[in-house]
Image: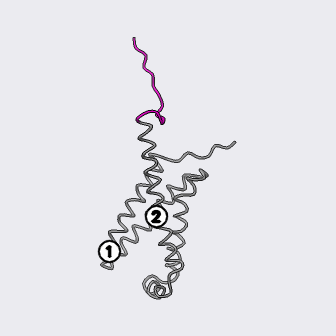
Amino acid sequence: MRAIILRKADQNTQAGAALNASNIALWIVQIFLAVVFVLHGFLMVAPPPELLQIINSQLGPGLRLFIGVAELLAAAGLILPGLTRILPVLTALAAAGLMIVMASATFFHLLRGEGGNAITTAILFVLVTAVAYLRWKVKPIAARVKA
């Protein structure tokens, strides 16, 4: 009779290598999204003077600041919990919050007839949805072990 040896998927197995590659790909997507939201959030919080009046007339100063601060905080939430491994579940929650922002932005741009902007925000919606799901269910980041 043959003995069956079960091994955990680690870096030396094909399954472990695939898991490691998917984790790296997910980190690349998270970093990309963080950069996008830092740039756009900063644009909303501190727009150039020539854009300030245009943005305020379309959104109002309160909503403009709210969106900017929310995007800056979410960008930090996509990266910092995973790097520090302190409350890494916040990464999935930050992505889930960005799902609301991107769904709203897509709807906003569709109402205004801005098809190109709507497509961009829809693509960002798909990416943040993927990060939220994958970091919540498929490839969560392990929390730091207390010493």
43 relative to 93, above or below:
below
- Which secondary structure is most common in the magenta stretch? loop
| Residue visible at 55% across and 45% down in the picture | 142
- Of residue 119 and residue 63, the one placed in the foreground of this image is 119
Q: Which residue is mark 1?
A: 110
SS of the residue at dot 2? helix
Find numbered disc 1 in the image and state the secondary structure of the residue it sits on.
helix
In the drawing, what numbered circle is on residue 98? 2
Relative image position of residue 61 (x, y in whole percent): 51, 83
Residue 23 highlighted magenta (yes or no): no
Q: Name the amino acid type tagged 2.
A: Leu
Q: CA distance from mark 1 to mark 2?
A: 18 Å
Q: Earlier in the sequence, mark 1 or mark 2?
A: 2
The residue segment tinted magenta is 1-14
Circle count: 2
Mark 1 packing: few (<14 Cα in 10 Å), some, or many (20+)?
some
Query: Where residue 116 appears, x then y in whole percent?
Result: 31, 73
Other-residue count near label 2 (Cα within 10 Å), few / some / many at <14 / 14–19 / ≥20: many
Q: Residue at x 48, y 31 (%)?
A: 8
Q: Amino acid at mark 1?
A: Leu
**Residue 120 circle label:** none
Q: Residue furthest front?
A: 12
Instruction: State which quarter of the image contains the N terminus.
Output: top left
19 relative to 112, above or below: above
Q: Nearer the viewer, residue 30 or 114?
A: 30
Which residue occupies the foreground of this view, 116 or 58? 116
At 43% across and 59% down in the image, what residue appears? Answer: 128
Are the residues tagged 1 and 2 within 8 Å (C-beta)? Answer: no
Q: Residue furthest top?
A: 1
